[in-house]
Amino acid sequence: MESSLVKDNPLLLPLNSEKTIYDGFVTVQERDFRMRIFLPPDRQLKWAKLHCSWQLKHLLHGYEPIVKQRLQQSADLVSFLLELKTVLEVGLKSRPECSSIPPPQYYSQLISEMETIGWDKLLSIDTEFRTLRLKAQDFSGRQHILTIKLQSKHPEEAPECSADLPVPLVVTWTPQSTLEQLHNQFLQVLESLTEFWDILDEIDSKTWILEPEKPSRSDTMRRITIGNNVSIKVEVDPRHPKMLPECCLLGAEHVVTPLRNKLNANMHLWNPDSSVLHNLQDVLEIEFPSPATHEKSAFSVECGICYSYRLDAAIPDQVCNNPRCGQPFHQACLLEWLRALPSSRQSFSIVFGECPYCSKPVTVKMSTHKS
Ligand code: ZN
Ligand code: ZN
């Protein structure tokens, strides 16, 4: 009997020479459950006492009468343990949440790895100890957050990592990789993006940004105020942040056309050693209005139809081209207005009509473009 007991349950060992106390683990579906078995001196099973770990207790909850019955009926410890494992297998199947509780090593590993990184880096951890948010600082002192979802059931698989970045976060992972290595890889990614964020931070602090309303670290686009109802939309390449960005001028034609001409004529002046903000000002031959020189309200002129500035996320980006008018409208508002007028006409996706303010011709595209 002893030999098959050891063979079936190699982690369960007698604690005394009388072999009345066994301690260790029973293994079911590759998971080990701690238990201790006390037998009376005559080693009769029906008087045996079981001490179970909390996980095992939780798993056997509701099956206690069956376990008792098996203790009464089993011929010896080997056959009882076999019966117990069958009960546990049924229990694991009916309680999938139990089978997903990671083994204790998972937690001790996690804690020792956190000690290596430093607890001050831990922003939060969920109650299941699976999703960690770690702090990281880039070279310019900006704070970033790395979210790591650990594959607690399959620790050898790569965890899911995410962060607020303008590029996909790619990390290399081997089963031997540690959290510290992930954190270090993240710091390297941050380092590679430092210049990109420096450039955008300069734009954000020295100009009036119309869009996005609250830029995140992953936003590569900025719509910068040039003047009343005139703005430039720039798309900065996170990989080559100092290169000439994609630019789009927005506003009334009579203001935008000369700026566009300057942009085209002066493009060769773009200096990759200088910042995007300075280059833009040099190429366009302008100074952007900044929080130091202007109030933002001077540039957030509301729509001439609905009298609000933001409509959902949109700002009034349609401007009457009459230099004496220049009234801005939301695209949706102007479209609705023009379509309600019998004098308006439509050609393909463009609606032609009259400005509600100055009655000069205005046009609006029907496609709901994304700003
Ligand atoms: Zn409107
Ligand atoms: Zn007008």
Image (cartoon, rainbow, N blue to C red):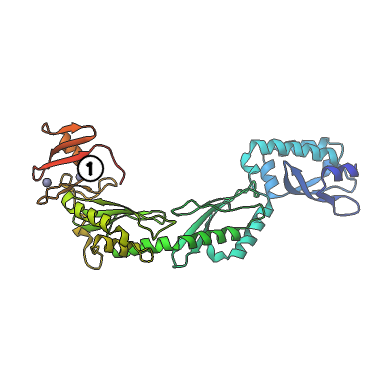
Q: Residue at x 64, y 50 (%)?
A: 155
Q: Could you tell whether 3 is left or right of 278 in the image?
A: right
Q: Could you tell whether 217 is left or right of 19 in the image?
A: left
Q: Can the viewer see residue 189? A: yes
Locate residue 363, reporting x and y percent: 17, 40
Q: Could you tell whether 303 is left or right of 38 in the image?
A: left
Q: Nearer the viewer, residue 168 or 82?
A: 168
Q: Nearer the viewer, residue 106 or 242?
A: 242
Instruction: Judge whether 153 appears above or below 339 on screen.
Output: below
Locate residue 137, reporting x and y percent: 48, 65
- The amino acid beneath tag 1 is Gln
Q: Could you tell whether 63 is left or right of 240 in the image?
A: right
Q: Residue at x 67, y 39 (%)?
A: 92
Q: Nearer the viewer, residue 91 or 188?
A: 188
Locate residue 139, reporting x and y percent: 47, 67
- Helix, strand or loop at label 1? It is helix
Residue holding disc 1: 331
